[in-house]
Amino acid sequence: MTAPPHTPHPAGPGRATPDTQQGMRRRNLARVMHAVSAGGPLSRAAVASRIGLTRAAVSTLVDELIRSGLLEELGPERPGRVGRPGSALAVSGRGPAGIGAEVGVDHLAVCAVDLRGEVRARAVRHAANRGRPPGPVIEDLNRLIRRVVAEAEGEGLWPAGLAVAVPGLVARDARTVVRAPNLAWDDTDLGELLPAEFPLTVGNEANFGALAELWLGEGAPRDFLHVSAEIGIGAAVVVDGRLLYGTRGFAGELGHVPVRPDGPECGCGGRGCLEQYAGEEAVLRAAGLEPDEDRVGLLAGRAEQGDEAVRRALRDAGEALGIALTGAVNLLDPQSVVLGGALAGLAPWLLPSLRAELTRRTAGPVCPVTVSRFGSQGPLLGAAHAVVRGVLDDPAAVAERA
């Protein structure tokens, strides 16, 4: 039930389908699902008014969606209203759910999100995944997936699909990790290692973080650059509400933009890349601190206590980020830059120097920089919601499985 490879997007109803009676039915089912999801609870009459179909046509579609377990009736919409009240419709809290997973350098995480957007189950395992072969890492991930699926099934949910966020380049097949330098993975087909019983989409963690911002953030812009970081730094470009993937699907590798061409060697093979100055481990080194399980918490705590070495390291990291982002802002002219991932937790000390560099170097008006409210949870939530959006975009496919 996930969107097709490399197309998890917020296009909503109206995706291209053949202009046949069956195609029109599929589009209209999606329109009803999106209307109720966005504005529910709604009566059939309210849905008909919103999407421009007759009440009779909407009733037929609604009945099909109720039989499929995608919508449910809550009872009279307004009990005290003059005339016969309509029955309020809502997206079902049971039935299909999106399973999102994340492979991080030092953690694994899985969650289940229902069609209402509520997280119904979650599991996290902290582990040093760098340098481990993909097989054992994915075995650990599979155990978490099975645990979350079992918990979700106990609440009347079933997995409509699995989306996995990884810190690396993903091929157009949405299965193969072409290169993940911070994991030391190359040309790894996760489709061979992950459960085969439901549809799979593998994607870059920064892209899924951007989708979480786009779909779940209040008043999110339609054109923005989302920056996400842990040990590595990635970015996602959203243009008119859609991800920009590039020819091979590799757009957004901000972490490997050189900010000082003669700087230290990077795992990608280049020198002076942004990750060498603004990644978590780089900031810890600059501050003279040993790595800790909670790197962001350590840095933020020391910065709050006035540790000048940490504050200086964060200022320098913000400056490097500003230099790298200047090229992207000048080239793309986004509405805003959104700071997400682990960087969100360090924003108070990164933003002053970051904004100063953007102000000094940007050719046009200064681009606003905001902080994501999802932080490090963005990629995991975006992955799970990509599956949910796939269900809303094509509920007929779920109906055929039900």
Image: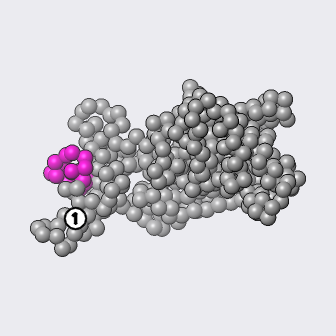
Q: What residue do we see at 76% from left, 33% from top? A: 259
| Residue 36 showing in the rendered view | yes
Q: What residue do we see at 47% from left, 61% from top? A: 118
Boundaries of the magenta span? 47-64
- Which of 338 and 70 lies nearest the eye of the viewer? 338
Which residue, given by chain and number where applicable, does mark 1 sit on? 87
- Which of 74 and 18 lies nearest the eye of the viewer? 74
Q: What residue do we see at 74% from left, 42% from top? A: 319
Tell which residue pokes out farthest to the bottom in this image: 80
**Most prominent secondary structure in the magenta stretch?**
helix
- Which of 21 and 272 lies nearest the eye of the viewer? 272
Q: For residue 274, which quarter of the picture? A: top right
The amino acid type of the residue labelled 1 equals: Ser
**Residue 293 x, y percent position in the rendering:** 77, 59
Please tell me whether residue 72 is drawn above or below residue 31 in the rendered image. below
Q: What residue do we see at 79% from left, 54% from top? A: 311
